[in-house]
Image (tube, rainbow, N blue to C red):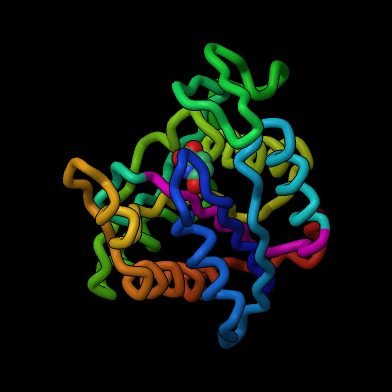
Amino acid sequence: MKVLVTGFEPFGGQPVNPSECVVGALAAQSFEGITLYTSILPVDHARAPAALLEALQAAQPNAVLCLGESGRRMRLSIERVAINLLDYPIADNAGQQFNDLMIATDGPAAYFTTLPVRALLDAVHAANVPVELSLSAGAFLCNQVMYTLLHHIATQQLHIPAGFTHLPFLPEQAARESMPVPSMSLHTMLEGIETMLYVLARDVSISPEAHV
Ligand code: PCA
């Protein structure tokens, strides 16, 4: 099966983005039964959706897992819901900052992820990697990408499990902070995300007519 995994470039003054590190490490490996496609998305409200849709077109995947950083999270956070809202206090990497703006004026208020969240949670937990289900991907770029992904899949009537997982800071990021913040090693993050990929490979029934 084909799986598209995306990450984000660094933002907010951070030297790295753990999602970019995880995606880079995954791309250097091979996974039995999985053809992996990867893409690093810009933290730019105008360019991120097009970059995501381009990656979807190129991969024609059977499942999509988008990754991003959330420095406040203590565990891998499998997001349940993307909301139709851009509302964030810091500028994106293009210097833009929005409040109270809809992502899609013709779209519903929210989408649930179509990933098998309970199976993913249980498998990652069984692999001894800290993980949780999270209600909301926020209202910044990660939410925008998750909403754009699920809106595209819904409107194109695709049958592709898709969703988002937030990652904590890496230890080298946490070490730079003046206040104590949680972190997780790249090795542990990779174990968790690899486990998720194998769950998707096991659980996802491949629809041959799925075209993105
Ligand atoms: N995290 C941000 C955007 C890019 C990223 O990695 C977010 O949580 O929205």
User: From what the image shows, is residue 76 above or below residue 23?
Assistant: above
What's the residue at 34%, 45% (across, down)? 71
Q: Is residue 59 magenta?
A: yes
* Residue 212 shows in the view: yes
Q: 193 and 70: which one is in front?
A: 70
Query: What percent of the width, then of the height, locates residue 211?
Result: 82, 56
Between 61 and 54, the residue placed more toward the observer is: 54
| Image location (x, y in percent) of residue 118 | 36, 56
Q: Quadrant of residue 64?
A: bottom right
Q: Which residue is outermost to the top?
A: 100
Does any portion of residue 112 appear in the rendered image?
Answer: no
* 26 relative to 42 in the view: left or right: left
**Residues rendered magenta in the picture:** 58-70
Does the stretch in magenta take in 180?
Answer: no
Residue at (52, 75) in percent of width and height: 25
Whether 171 is drawn above or below 81: the answer is: below
> In the picture provided, is 57 more to the left or to the right than 199?
right
At which x and y percent is residue 90?
Answer: 47, 26
Q: Residue at x 29, y 42 (%)?
A: 72
Q: Left or right: where does residue 71 sit relative to residue 79?
A: left
> From the image, which quarter does the N terminus lie in?
bottom right
